[in-house]
Amino acid sequence: DIVMTQSPDSLAVSLGERATINCKSSQSVLYSSNNRNYLAWYQQKPGQPPKLLIYWASTRESGVPDRLSGSGSGTDFTLTISSLQAEDVAVYYCQQYYSKPYTFGQGTKLEIK
Amino acid sequence: EVQLVESGGGLVQPGRSLRLSCEASGFAFGDYAMHWVRQAPGRGLEWVSGIDWNGGNIDYADSVKGRFTISRDNAKNSLFLQMNSLRPEDTALYYCAKDPTTKPYYMDVWGKGTTVTVSS
């Protein structure tokens, strides 16, 4: 199984500042035939189901603010929030869909400093 | 409005069975793959199972393989998860989630979940 490891486990950032969450896979999730990275990012706020933010590592889901962006390739990926807003407080998860069983990272809790 | 509503959760003794249902509305259910994802209390997300648009391609997490069975009824816009030989470690909030493609990859719409508690 592909192991997804996020860092840090928790992060406190001041409003308006940049937040960066990392996700590393135990093997590449880049499919060479189509040059796509099979990685998604989700946001989960307390008491709510997860919400899709990013898929194919860098494609933003409709309605997601452009201050959130995904980057990376192969085994190393990053979710960046360019200017933290209060509504961004949540737990963020990466997920690989390159091979089954699909696996999630352990989550990164983002708070306001 | 695209909506997924799970039901069927509850308190069950170890070794017993439970069947979860997910009723979909607001989209062409039969055109999309579907998933079950669970979240144990205070823990992260765990993918449980996925099924493609017509039920021809099914996969499971190792932790549930041989005990859980996913199925769908496209005529009734419904997804199911038959859970047998339940264990305390199956205790979790179970989410039904839609995939934006015909094959199970990732999840673009989630239900609110149904809680399963396995305890004697």
Image: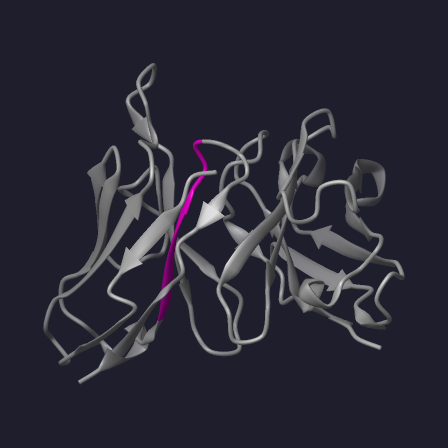
Q: Magenta region, mostly helix, strand or loop?
A: strand
> Nearest the camera: A31 or B52?
A31
The picture quadrant where one finds residue A86 is: bottom left
Question: Residue A39 vs residue B54: left or right?
Answer: left
For the point 30% across and 41% down, the residue is A57
For the point 80% across and 57% down, the residue is B20
- Give x and y (percent) for residue B93: 65, 68
Magenta stretch, residue numbers: A91-98
Question: Residue B96 vs residue A58: left or right?
Answer: right
Q: Is residue A16 above or below residue A69?
A: below
Q: Quadrant of the image for the C terminus of chain A? A: bottom left
Q: Is residue B64 above or below residue A47?
A: above
- Give x and y (percent) for residue B37: 60, 54
- Give x and y (percent) for residue A17: 10, 73
Residue placed furthest toward the bottom: A113
Indicate yes or no whether the magenta region holds residue B103.
no
